[in-house]
Amino acid sequence: MTREERLAHIRDVVDSAPLPPPEDIDRLRALLQLHVRTTAVAPTQRKRAAAAKAA
């Protein structure tokens, strides 16, 4: 199987996969946003904790 054939097969499989229901998509979006916010805030909180410990 050539690279092009393999990519075409993967595209076919992905295109034929059923989509999850909208409520599952909403739940996944919320989890992703929570993860993004948590990872963005964590370094700041760590800096504040280190500064408070040093003071």
Image (cartoon, rainbow, N blue to C red):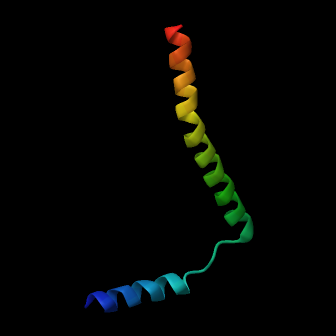
Residue farthest to the left, as pictured: 1
Q: Residue extending furthest right? A: 23
Q: Nearer the viewer, residue 40 or 12?
A: 40
Viewer-side residue, 34 vs 41: 41
Q: Residue at x 54, y 87 (%)?
A: 16
Left/right of residue 52 with respect to residue 20 in the rendered view: left
Q: Give the residue at x 57% y 31%.
A: 44
* Vertical relation: 48 (above or below) 11: above
Q: Quadrant of the N terminus?
A: bottom left
Left or right relative to 4: residue 44: right
Examine the rendered structure and indicate whether residue 15 appears above or below residue 25. below
- Tell me where residue 38 appears, x and y as whole percent: 60, 40
Q: How many marks?
A: 0
**Considering depth in this image, is 40 or 29 the residue closer to the camera?**
40
Q: Position of residue 50 (x, y in %)?
A: 50, 18
Toward the top, the furthest residue is 55
In the rendered image, the vertical position of residue 40 relative to residue 3, given as above or below: above
- List x then y, in percent, for residue 42: 56, 34
